[in-house]
Amino acid sequence: MLFRSLKQPSTVSTYVVQRGDTLNSIAAQPTVYNDAKKWTLLYENNRDALDNPMAIYPGQVLKVIPEN
């Protein structure tokens, strides 16, 4: 008999970049990762939209994927 692990699907949310935001400041928000050091998660999960982690613009929509 084959058993599969049934894992709850991750809930992906989004964040709209505001004027003055950085990936660090976004990651530090309690509704995102609550830790500025986790800015790399935002960058890696949004590589399709971000060529440079230092260049984000107001109005950009970033995916916020929960940590595993």
Image (spheres, grey):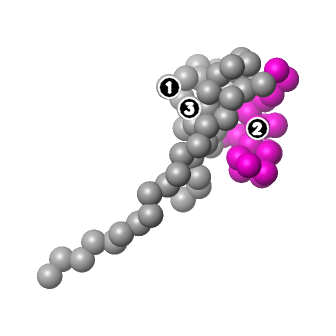
Front-most of residues 31 and 48: 31
Q: Are marks 2 and 1 in contact (CB under 8 Å)?
A: no
Residue 62 against residue 19 in the figure, above or below: below
Which percent across, then down, holds residue 41?
Answer: 62, 43
**Distance in Å between CA atoms under marks 2 and 3:** 13 Å
Q: Does residue 12 show up?
A: yes
Give the residue number, with chain letter if any, for mark 2: 26
Label 1: which secondary element = loop
Q: Is residue 32 a member of the stretch shown in magenta?
A: yes
Residue 57 relative to residue 10: left or right: right
Q: Is residue 39 a member of the stretch shown in magenta?
A: yes
Tell me the tag on residue 48.
Answer: 1
**Distance in Å between CA atoms under marks 1 and 3:** 5 Å
Q: What residue is drawn where x is 59% and y is 43%?
A: 13
Q: What residue is drawn where x is 78% and y is 25%?
A: 18
Residue 47 relative to residue 21: left or right: left
Give the residue number, with chain letter if any, for mark 3: 46
The residues colored magenta run 19-40
